[in-house]
Image: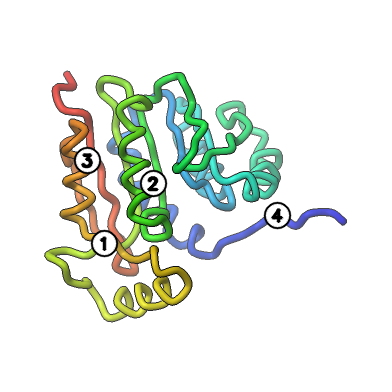
């Protein structure tokens, strides 16, 4: 049976607002690793808008066939084949990237997985590396909207280890590995795009 190319409507809705932020912070980047590429839609869109970037997709093995369908259709030279990657076990790429991007993943991961993701970044990011994270966040321990509170409840029903993360806790993980917050940008539908950069970058 021929596989149907996966499609997420949310990617169609959020790709342009995310791209506006990436254009500010990824314009001088050359190699980006995307963690949890999902369908592959974001990768195709961002690789087209940022042609100087080699956009490396990655996800759990089960997601790779769908990502490949998107990449094969796009046929872009800056979209290498996707990597199988589990944040708990790797295998992590050995070569450094000057940017890492992830969207709608931290609230799906357990907190232990979020910590494992950040623990891997010092080996992944170049000396001036940039990290961009898209998704919903709580601030001061509070939901930013009723819809986010309902979404958090749905996440925790599905998996008790999931849930919307507190910005302060995630920022503390970033600071603990030498990343400084460069931008916290409001996105549609009560989401944020957070950007950190390695401190001491010239």
- First in sequence: mark 3 or mark 1? 1
Residue to which mark 1 is pinned: 137
The label nearer to you, 3 versus 1, is: 3
Residue shown at 31% from the left, 45% from the top:
115
- First in sequence: mark 4 or mark 1? 4
Residue to which mark 2 is pinned: 19
In front of the other: 94 or 104: 94
Quadrant of the snapshot with the N terminus: bottom right
Residues at marks 3 and 1, CA–CA distance in whole angstroms: 15 Å
> What is the basis of the colouring in this image?
rainbow
CB contact under 8 Å: marks 4 and 3: no
Q: Is residue 132 above or below residue 104?
A: above
Residue 5 placement (x, y as % from top left): 70, 54
Residue shown at 42% from the left, 71% from the top:
155
Quadrant of the snapshot with the C terminus: top left
Query: Counting other residues with Cα less than 10 Å from the Cα at mark 2, is it few (<14), some (14-19), or many (20 or more)?
Result: some
Q: Residue 162 carries which label?
A: none
Residues at marks 4 and 3, CA–CA distance in whole angstroms: 35 Å
Residues at marks 2 and 3, CA–CA distance in whole angstroms: 22 Å
Q: Residue 174 carries which label?
A: 3
Left or right: where does residue 122 sit relative to residue 142?
A: right
In front of the other: 67 or 22: 67
Residues at marks 4 and 1, CA–CA distance in whole angstroms: 30 Å
CB contact under 8 Å: marks 1 and 2: no
Left or right: where does residue 183 sit relative to residue 161?
A: left
The label nearer to you, 1 versus 2, is: 1
**SS for dot 1:** strand
Residue shown at 63% from the left, 44% from the top:
61
Residue to which mark 4 is pinned: 5
CB contact under 8 Å: marks 3 and 1: no
């Amino acid at each position: 049976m021929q596989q149907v190319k996966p499609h997420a409507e949310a990617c169609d809705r959020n790709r342009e607002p995310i791209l506006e932020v990436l254009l500010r912070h990824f314009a001088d980047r050359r190699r980006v690793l995307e963690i949890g590429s999902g369908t592959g839609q974001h990768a195709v869109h961002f690789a087209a808008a940022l042609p100087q970037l080699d956009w490396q997709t990655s996800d759990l093995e089960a997601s790779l066939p769908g990502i490949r369908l998107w990449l094969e259709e796009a046929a872009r030279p800056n979209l290498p084949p996707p990597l199988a990657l589990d944040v708990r076990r790797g295998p992590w790429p050995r070569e450094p990237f000057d940017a890492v991007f992830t969207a709608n993943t931290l609230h799906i991961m357990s907190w232990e997985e979020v910590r494992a993701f950040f623990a891997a970044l010092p080996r992944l990011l170049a000396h001036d590396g940039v990290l961009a994270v898209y998704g919903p966040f709580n601030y001061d321990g509070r939901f930013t909207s009723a819809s986010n509170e309902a979404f958090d409840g749905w996440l925790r029903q599905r998996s008790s280890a999931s849930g919307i993360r507190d910005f302060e806790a995630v920022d503390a993980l970033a600071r603990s590995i030498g990343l400084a917050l460069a931008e916290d940008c409001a996105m549609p539908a009560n989401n944020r795009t957070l950007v950190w950069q390695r401190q001491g970058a010239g």
